[in-house]
Amino acid sequence: MALSVVYSRAGVGVSAPLVTIEVHISNGLPGLSIVGLPETSVKESKDRVRGAIINSNFEFPAKRIIINLAPADLPKEGGRFDLPIAIGILLASGQIQAANTEVFEMLGELALSGALREVSGILPVALQAQKANRQLILPVDNANEASLVCKDEVLAADSLLAVCQHISGQKPLRFYQAEDKIPEKDNHLNMLDVKGQYQARRAMEIAAAGGHSILMVGSPGTGKTMLASRLPGILPEMSESEAAEAAVVQSISAQGFEQQNWRKRAFRAPHHTASAVALVGGGSNPKPGEISLAHHGVLFLDELPEFGRHVLEVLREPLESGRIVISRAARQAEYPASFQMVAAMNPCPCGYHGDKSGQCCCTAEQVTRYKNKISGPLMDRIDMHIEVPRLENVNQLSDKAESIEASEQIRERVQTARNLQIARNGGCNAKMQVKDIEVHCQLDQASQQFLNQTIEKLKLSNRAYHRILKLARTIADLEKQESIGVKHIAEAVNYRRLDRAGH
């Protein structure tokens, strides 16, 4: 036949829209035209496809070939369309026969020899192919990754010839059987390494249980970075859906998805010289930033005041909504950004304000100016503000390990509290909406009176009021208490250290 239709998928953000590849061959001067908004890399595919077809012992038609990539208004880029274009040409020229191509979706870059090379962003494609109930044909090097989310529907091929033999029924491909690729070993840093700092460790446990953001303030060397780096080790285990969402974002990023990270919560720690685009994503061809790569994981911002003011302000919206929308004149991309923010800062420019060592040489004006680098609206969105003081004596550095809990013990309590939250409101307490707070965070008269007095005295915002309630709910969950008491409210208020700084 002179016309063939093959299905593939493009990559737009975390989605993979269907692309229908139509190939028409007619008499006329030999030539090949690709229409449908192809980028340069797609236009160059005609040379790769020609070499692959000839070197696979097929004949490249010496006729007029028109290839349409529909929909026409969707930008197409990369070498992922090489394989479906080559199959479309062979079908349209009658060199191979296929009873039904509608049951397949395929993608892959072709080498001039006809071998198939891996492409990026395969996980969104696998998810959409599974929803469309189609079998996915792709390079062998991509099969292991795709099999994480697309069970028993992945057909892995190593060459153009193998794909032709499969769709023509000569030599069917076998469904890919995933390897044992998920390591069970827990290689997270352990809380046993943290000596002293019992209040800070308690705060990290509460933050992990409820998914709360936290800011640690302390002099250099008090253990802020050590505590933050051990947070992933006490976080609850990721669900299959959370693992798939996080893996999809990594799959479309520049670094790609590494299979050993499946169901492991990300820990991203960008340097304070990072730009706003690096943090939230962007570019002419939008890519996810650090906040999206930390989806369902931890974003650690060390030396918080050293970040640019405009860089920090872009965090305000995703901290509330859990997503980021990047708009450009030509296109728009939306990425998930439900991350747990952990930040650390010194109390002043020299780092020793309020420290018992008495080394601080900063004036009151310098200290105020340093703290004001972080805006009030951003500070208001951080659930917990805690101090990480210098240890009183060096003997605390040699505390017996028996007096310190390991990450595994803390994680058990955190997992129990998180299970209560999921059963009650479908997610962690930090994500509760106002209507959920009204239902699940009801207070008795004494607790309500205490909280009202606190709010009035500290002049807290309505947002801070709700965050204190959510924090108190998490503290009660850790104690397996159905109701919130005065002690839970008091502890939650104690974790708003910077709200009390001026009082």
Image (cartoon, rainbow, N blue to C red):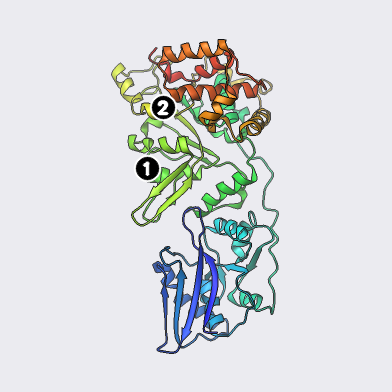
Q: Which mark is residue 419?
A: none
Return the x and y of residue 351 as percentages of the image width and height: 39, 23
Q: Please determine whether, in this image, residue 235 is positioned above or below residue 398.
A: below
At 45% from the left edge and 73% from the top edge, which residue is drawn? 68
Q: Which mark is residue 276?
A: 1
Quarter of the image with the C terminus is top left
Which sits in the foreground, 380 or 256? 380
Return the x and y of residue 172 as percentages of the image width and height: 69, 74
Looking at the picture, which amino acid does disc 1 mark? Ala
Residue 107 left/right relative to 152: left
Return the x and y of residue 226 as percentages of the image width and height: 53, 30
At 47% from the left edge and 25% from the top edge, which residue is drawn? 216
Which sits in the foreground, 291 or 187? 291
Quarter of the image with the N terminus is bottom right
Label 1 Cα neighbours within 10 Å, binned few <14 / some 14-19 / many ≥20: many
Residue 25 left/right relative to 327: right
Which sits in the foreground, 277 or 152? 152
Q: Please determine whether, in this image, residue 498 is positioned above or below residue 87.
A: above
Residue on which the image places disc 2: 379
Q: Please determine whether, in this image, residue 186 is positioned above or below residue 489.
A: below
Looking at the picture, which amino acid does disc 2 mark? Met
At 62% from the left edge and 21% from the top edge, which residue is drawn? 476
Image quadrant assignment for residue 211: top right
Q: Secondary structure at mark 2?
A: helix
Q: Nearer the viewer's eye, disc 2 or disc 1?
A: 2
Q: Secondary structure at mark 1?
A: helix
Q: CA distance from mark 2 to mark 1?
A: 18 Å
